[in-house]
Amino acid sequence: MEQTYHYNTLPNGLRIVYQRRQGSVAYCGLAVQAGSRDDGARLGLAHFVEHTIFKGTRRRKAWHILNRMERVGGELNAYTTKEETLVYSVFPSGNMARAVELIADLVCNSTFPEHEIDKEREVVVEEIDSYRDSPADAIYDDFEDLIFADTPLGHNILGNEETLQSLTGADCLDYVANLYVPTNMVLFAVDSIPAERFFALSERYFGAMHHPLHRLSCKPIVAAAPFEHLRDIDAHQSHTVVGTTTFGMHDSRKYALLLANNILGGPGMNSTLNVAIRERRGYAYTVESTVTLLSDVGLFTIYFGSDHRHTAKCRRLIDDELRRIADGGITERALNAAKKQYIGQLIVSSESSENRALSLGKEVLNFGTTLNVEAVANRIRAVSVDDIRAVGQMLCSNLSTLTFR
């Protein structure tokens, strides 16, 4: 089905993207170019703001905020990444005005009351503890801490208990005042109402915002020298992450990287690492690779969890698969099959209404427009065997390893 998107920009600089689509469920939210990279010395601040922005405004108490969308069967949610925060609602169609007004109230009028701040600290501490109790999750954070050491990217998005205790409502207010501003945000929505109606709601509730953006320019990220660390956590199973930094999201080589990642350890059970490590040898229950692309840098990682006696064997098999790609071992026939699989996955994922709605805001935030599935598919089709080999050579260089055991 052809997708039609409508764009607008308010006089204050707030960008808007809207998809008109018939259906019983609607979506509305804000994508903010602010994440843990903007924490400064107050580690965990971006994520803490995401939690506490729901705790009271000049018009509403926390209870009224939580009930505003839930009383009509909707949900209010948010999440934080290294460079973005999304605040959004999913709700039955017919409630768009309610959602736009509420989200505007959160951004424009949040008060961050201290009694609510104190309670939410404990919630986030519990969230941190839950990650630490899961080595398969915690190892990713520790790996990023090491590879991005001494940079704004080199700390856990959640912060730590010590820094959380120092955060105040004033810190949250300052963060929102400086970064939750029109030119740093994109308002997005999917619903069946006419685009003009949504734009009018946007102007009504967001038009009064007039705050300049005071963001310091990002310093270039310099990754740490390759490392190989082993940490004894007295676990029954070894957990290992192997990885390296890459180029960022605006580099044209990313399509070859995404395709190579899918071949190696993507979601398909036929990924080469899953076949080599799990299916043929039974060395690991889970093996997967991931690409994370930020504005100016990226990260490629491979994770596996195995019995202690198989860790070194799995590591050698990973090196073998990476070297095979770097040496041109992916034939034209194999590449075409990989392209067909990746494009099929793209099509399937595009049918997820919530994921697609959230992508609208993130894509306009980062690229200035939405990304058409067919246009992305064409870029994947254009990847050559030489492109894959070049990416493989990049991935083989400067690999770092972290193991928990």
Image: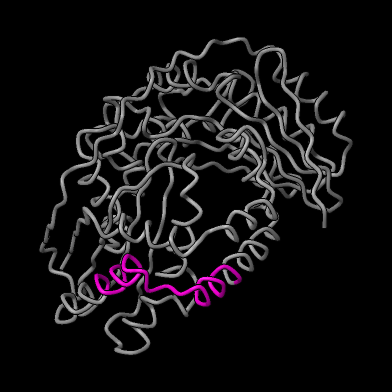
Question: Looking at the image, is 311 positioned above or below residue 144?
Answer: below
Q: How many marks?
A: 0
Q: Percent x, y for residue 313?
A: 19, 79
Colouring used for the render: one colour
Q: Nearer the viewer, residue 254 or 47?
A: 254
Q: Is residue 194 above or below residue 372?
A: above
Above or below: residue 299 compared with residue 304? above
Check residue 374 for magenta coloring: no
Residue 68 in the image, given as x and y percentages of width and height: 69, 37
Q: Is residue 137 left or right of residue 47?
A: left
Q: Quadrant of residue 243?
A: bottom left
| Identity of the residue drawn at 76% across and 43% down | 190
Is residue 338 shown in magenta? yes
Left/right placement of residue 250 relative to residue 376 reads left
Is residue 132 placed above or below 187 in the rendered structure? Answer: below
- Say whether residue 154 is left or right of residue 169: left
Q: Split into 4 quadrants, where in the image is the N terminus?
A: bottom right
Residue depicted at x 49% and y 39% = 250
Position in image of residue 343 (x %, y %): 62, 65
Compare residues 163 and 346 and report the one nearer the observer. 346
Q: Residue at x 76, y 37 (%)?
A: 18
Closer-to-camera residue (9/100): 9
User: Magenta part mainly helix, strand or loop?
Assistant: helix
Identify the image quadrant of residue 347.
bottom right
Give the quadrant of the C terminus.
bottom left
Q: Which residues are magenta?
A: 318-340
Q: Residue at the location (23% across, 50% down)?
A: 142
Viewer-side residue, 216 vs 260: 260
